Image: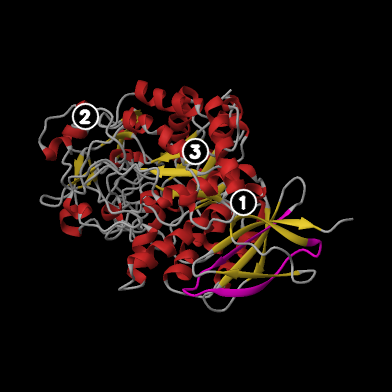
């Protein structure tokens, strides 16, 4: 039994009772808030029960400086290690991640999702514009961790240490592409522009007028082994060339054969080339091919077999054909169940920075992905808190929950987030949306965003460093700061929120007000199933910035909870619809009204960027 969890959770819940009226989480001690007390029962938690922490291992903690160069020569263009450059390895590793599990558990994190740790091509890119594979998305060997991060034994140690705390482990995986190894003989003249299936059919070499090749191949719509046995020549669009020095660099071995790639040139991320083009030059796998499908099932099934991991976040999921997911997902779920993992989480990245549930929901219906990252939530939160749009946008967002396969119940499992390693941090977006914003207002808006993230429907994902008030200069490399003392100038000149330190110092402060807010809200989620798996009903919204309110209902007792948030820069009063049995409110966080004003209505008075989390008391029967 996880006695450490039981001790810290009891401290946390006791504080919540004593600090119920405190808006500022600094008034409550940071404490662990794991959902399930015994570590042995962590497998029983549903995805909606988790508080997820997304981290880039290279930027988190350096537990073993001996692996900083990945066993390669020290030259930055060979090893990829240069802690002063934002696009190179900085030294974080699996040992460092393991050493900080107490820090994560004390914040209430119950699942750790980390960027890919597989062996990567250390450095790639044109001369003068090189960067390193510190992020993990340029895989050459899918069978082992990159030496910059550690060994299989160190990965085992991390997984075992997390599981001993009742914490789950989510791996970030890629099925769409590998590292950029394949070249095209015609590339210098064309610039690797995409060549379509109509202009360059599989049946001719180099275009409709070329020599006949692949006789009998019926196209990529038939994924049978018999059909793909007829696809033997991959030079229909370009002539693929593999440099001799990299002829056997990919593992497993089958990945070195160009016939298992689309070889059609670079994607523009629209139309046909979104699925058939190389993602920023990365070698695009022919996922319609049955050998590729089985190969990926074998690769990732073995990680489940060998380490007992708890879930996959799937990179670039929208760039893979739907047929692949209809085969891959059931195979992974079956493999997990065979290993005693009944609630294996699978969520796809369907990048779309607009508040449109319908776009991402289609991937749960046509592609049959169990769930997807909730980019619609992220975009809506930016519109409401960054751009000052009306809270009606949140009502529209939740109206779209019916579109997911499984409807509103399935939407409870959606991983929700405010920012990430690609688009940037939420604090950065709000700062960009509101030029001249003060540090105090930026902090208030970001804090409200986290309160909403942690209590509204979905499984909240905290992007590493957000709990320490990180504010970057943009997306991608500019949003991937170091948690350990950084040597990167473009990070160290950032002005963080909620603290006076910079990224030049270590940032694992458990007294930071955002860290403490997440811990407080995680404890509430742990204590109240309604805030994890409870049905959500929108109760109040406005056409302008102001109050947004929902009710959430305990999945077993039906007990109502009312959550109200004020997105405006001034205090607001709103009459909020509540259940007609409601008479009084118990304050869990913020400032709740003592009682209803009349059956079915309660007056919520909220400060600027304030909130209230309330449990309803019913009328006597």
Q: Residues within 10 Å of mark 3 (few under 14, many from 20)?
A: many
Number of numbered discs on residues: 3
Tag shown at residue 65: 2
Magenta span: chief secondary structure: strand
Q: Earlier in the sequence, mark 2 or mark 3?
A: 2
Give the answer, above or below, for where 311 lies relative to 377. Answer: above
| Residue stretch rendered in magenta on the structure | 560-582
The picture places residue 22, in percent across and down from the top left corner, at 54, 55
In the rendered image, the quadrant that contains the N terminus is top right
Q: Is residue 571 magenta?
A: yes
Tell me the quarter of the picture where residue 159 sits: top left
Could you tell me which residue is drawn at 38 percent across and 49 percent down?
Answer: 512
Residue closer to the observer: 469 or 398: 469
Q: Earlier in the sequence, mark 3 or mark 1?
A: 3
In the rendered image, the quadrant that contains the C terminus is bottom right
**Horizontal placement of 21 versus 292: left or right?**
right
Give the answer, above or below, for where 487 lies relative to 542. Answer: above
Secondary structure of the residue carrying tag 1 is loop
The residue where tag 1 is placed is 412
Tell me the quarter of the picture where residue 552 sits: bottom right
Give the answer, above or below, for where 133 lies relative to 127. Answer: above
* Most distant residue in the top direction: 153
Mark 3 or 1: in front is: 3
**Cα–Cα gap, marks 2 and 1:** 41 Å
**Horizontal placement of 570 versus 585: left or right?**
left
Could you tell me which residue is drawn at 30 percent across and 73 percent down?
Answer: 436
């Amino acid at each position: 039994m996880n006695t450490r969890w039981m001790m810290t959770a009891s401290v946390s819940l006791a504080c919540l009772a004593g600090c119920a009226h405190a808006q500022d989480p600094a008034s409550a001690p940071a404490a662990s808030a794991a959902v399930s007390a015994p570590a042995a029962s962590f497998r029983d938690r549903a995805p909606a029960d988790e508080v997820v922490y997304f981290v880039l291992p290279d930027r988190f903690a350096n537990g073993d400086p001996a692996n900083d160069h990945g066993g390669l020569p020290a030259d930055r263009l060979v090893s990829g290690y240069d802690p002063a450059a934002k696009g190179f390895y900085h030294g974080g590793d699996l040992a460092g991640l393991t050493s900080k599990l107490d820090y994560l558990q004390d914040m209430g994190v119950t699942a750790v999702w980390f960027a890919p740790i597989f062996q990567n091509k250390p450095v790639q890119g044109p001369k003068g514009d090189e960067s390193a594979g510190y992020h993990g998305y340029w895989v050459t060997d899918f069978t082992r961790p990159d030496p910059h991060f550690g060994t299989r034994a160190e990965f085992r140690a991390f997984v075992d240490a997390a599981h001993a705390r009742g914490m789950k482990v989510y791996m970030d995986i890629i099925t769409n592409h590998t590292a950029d190894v394949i070249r095209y003989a015609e590339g210098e003249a064309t610039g690797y522009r995409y060549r379509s299936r109509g202009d360059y059919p599989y049946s001719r070499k180099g275009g409709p007028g070329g020599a006949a090749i692949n006789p009998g191949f019926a196209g990529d719509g038939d994924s049978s082994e018999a059909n793909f046995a007829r696809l033997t020549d991959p030079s229909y669009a370009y002539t693929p060339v593999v440099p001799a020095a990299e002829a056997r660099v990919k593992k497993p071995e089958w990945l070195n054969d160009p016939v298992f790639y689309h070889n059609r040139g670079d994607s523009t991320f629209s139309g046909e080339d979104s699925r058939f083009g190389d993602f920023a030059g990365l070698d695009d796998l022919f996922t319609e091919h049955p050998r590729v499908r089985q190969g990926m099932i074998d690769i990732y099934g073995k990680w489940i077999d060998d380490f007992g991991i708890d879930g996959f976040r799937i990179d670039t999921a929208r760039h893979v054909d739907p047929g692949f997911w209809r085969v891959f997902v059931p195979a992974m779920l079956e493999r997990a169940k065979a290993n005693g993992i009944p609630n294996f989480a699978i969520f796809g990245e369907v990048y779309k920075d607009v508040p449109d549930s319908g776009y991402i929901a289609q991937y749960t219906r046509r592609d049959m992905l169990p769930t997807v990252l909730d980019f619609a939530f992220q975009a809506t939160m930016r519109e409401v808190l960054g751009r000052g749009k009306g809270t009606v946008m949140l009502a529209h967002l939740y109206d779209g929950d019916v579109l997911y396969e499984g409807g509103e119940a399935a939407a409870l499992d959606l991983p929700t987030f405010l920012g990430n390693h690609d688009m940037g941090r939420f604090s950065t977006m709000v700062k960009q949306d509101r030029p001249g914003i003060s540090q105090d207002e930026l902090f208030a808006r970001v804090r409200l965003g986290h309160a909403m993230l942690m209590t509204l429907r979905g499984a909240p994902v905290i992007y590493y460093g957000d709990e320490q008030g990180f504010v970057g200069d943009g997306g991608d490399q500019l949003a991937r700061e170091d948690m350990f003392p950084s040597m990167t100038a473009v990070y160290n000149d950032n002005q963080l929120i909620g603290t006076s330190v910079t990224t030049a110092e270590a940032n694992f402060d458990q007294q930071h007000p955002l860290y403490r807010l997440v811990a407080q809200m995680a404890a509430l989620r742990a204590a109240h199933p309604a805030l994890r798996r409870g049905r959500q009903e929108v109760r109040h919204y406005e056409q302008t910035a102001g109050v947004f309110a929902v009710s959430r209902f305990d999945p077993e007792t039906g007990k109502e909870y009312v959550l109200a948030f004020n997105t405006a820069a001034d205090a607001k009063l709103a009459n909020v619809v509540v259940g007609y049995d409601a008479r009084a409110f118990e304050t869990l966080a913020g400032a709740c009204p003592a009682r209803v004003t009349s059956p079915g209505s309660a007056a919520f008075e909220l400060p600027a960027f304030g909130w209230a989390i309330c449990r309803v008391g019913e009328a006597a029967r």
